Image (cartoon, rainbow, N blue to C red):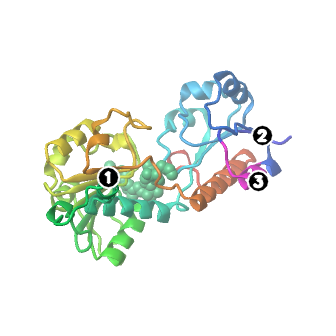
Amino acid sequence: MKPYVFIDRPIPAEAEAYIAEHCAYSIWDRKDPIPPDVLQEELSQANGLLTSGRKIDSSFLEAAPRLRAVSTISVGYNHFDITAMKARGVIGTNTPDVLNETVADLVFALILSSARRTPELDRYVKDGLWKPGDNENLFGIDVHHSSLGIIGMGRIGEAIARRAKFGFSMEVSYCNRSRREHAEQQYGAVYMTLEELLRTSDFVLLMTPLTPETARLIGRDQFRMMKKTAIFINASRGQTVDETALIEALQEGTIRAAGLDVFDREPIDPDSPLLRMPNVVTLPHIGSATARTRYEMAMLAARNLVLAVTGQTPPNVVAELS
Ligand SMILES: NC(=O)C1=CN([C@@H]2O[C@H](COP(=O)(O)OP(=O)(O)OC[C@H]3O[C@@H](n4cnc5c(N)ncnc54)[C@H](O)[C@@H]3O)[C@@H](O)[C@H]2O)C=CC1
Ligand SMILES: O=C(O)C(=O)CO
């Protein structure tokens, strides 16, 4: 008998067709949330789940007694409760690498737009505020030949370092759980402590996964270590930063500006002060959001799921569960 899998969101037709070849399945092919009774019914039967961002914890797993694998359409898997999954022998897979270049492009969009104030000045032109004699009030800061500190020099971090070095002649430094020889040799990246990186970088970029170790890694003390002219970029997860401390740092001029793709709560609270600051560029968590990359991610997630539920070893079992 074919394994039964549940797909909890719309996916490209090719990914669905691939799953259909190998599994019995059902799909929640709509944007509105799945009603609890439908989810409950699906989980009671499913051997596999294809998802993106759904919290997989012990209460979820209790409702899914036959579940063998969860495949997430994301590289980040902070929504997996590893202990609970391990305890039940549930495999978890993610989608690394296929999104590296796309996320790196987006990080550069944040770097450039926050340094040169492009969203703010676009609004300025469209609001009819541009007048003869405008000069210093339109100034930004240079990206080329400045310094970029990357916290979390992993797969995406390296794609960013390459752009920084060869596209913008930037000095790259990094901190990481371990040395990344390739980034040092290819992009001249200099390994530093977090404190040293914060004190010396013009742009501070957070690119780590969210883990107990990185939760609130950047808070009030860390913003105070940064240059007053520093621009803070976060494309990791909102919870790696103390958002209250970030707001305070921007309000008090502890740092110059921020470019943010991720937030503590997503979608962000419409009343957040971050939305009213001209020196903050905000994006709706779109790091990997191009049609081609999202397609590749869905295809990879579908392959991971099929392999896992048919008793084979998928290529992208997350490290803690392999
Ligand atoms: N904004 C967006 O749309 C996207 C966000 N992401 C986020 O980016 C993260 C990184 O993705 P990859 O580069 O593929 O992961 P990766 O695992 O290749 O790299 C992460 C790096 O962070 C380092 N790290 C972990 N804990 C650290 C700590 N406490 N201090 C310093 N470094 C630490 C690791 O040593 C590793 O080299 C994902 O987990 C996800 O949260 C990923 C894709 C898109
Ligand atoms: O892959 C991830 O972890 C994302 O945040 C979205 O692509």
Q: Is 110 in front, or is 75?
A: 110
Q: Report if the beta carbon of the residue with label 3 is closer than 8 angstroms to ligand 2.
A: no
Q: Is 84 in front, or is 14?
A: 14
Give coordinates of residue 14: x percent, y percent: 74, 55
Q: Report if the beta carbon of the residue with label 1 is closer than 8 angstroms to ligand 1.
A: no
Q: Nearer the viewer, mark 1 or mark 3?
A: 1
- What is the secondary structure assignment of the residue under circle 2? strand
Residue furthest to the right in view is: 1
Residue furthest to the top in view is: 37
With 304 as the anchor, is 267 left or right in this view? left
Give coordinates of residue 54: x percent, y percent: 55, 36
- Whether residue 242 is visible: no
In the displayed structure, 137 sits above or below 78; it is: below
Q: Earlier in the sequence, mark 2 or mark 1?
A: 2
Which residues, given as a range, are shown in magenta?
Answer: 10-19
Amino acid type for the residue under numbered disc 2: Tyr
Identified at 66% across, 52% down, the residue is: 304
Contact between labelled residues 1 and 2, with CB atoms less than 8 Å apart? no
Q: Which residue is mark 2?
A: 25
Identified at 33% across, 32% down, the residue is: 271
Amino acid type for the residue under numbered disc 3: Tyr
Identified at 15% across, 57% down, the residue is: 229
The answer to whether residue 18 is magenta is yes
Q: Which residue is mark 1?
A: 127
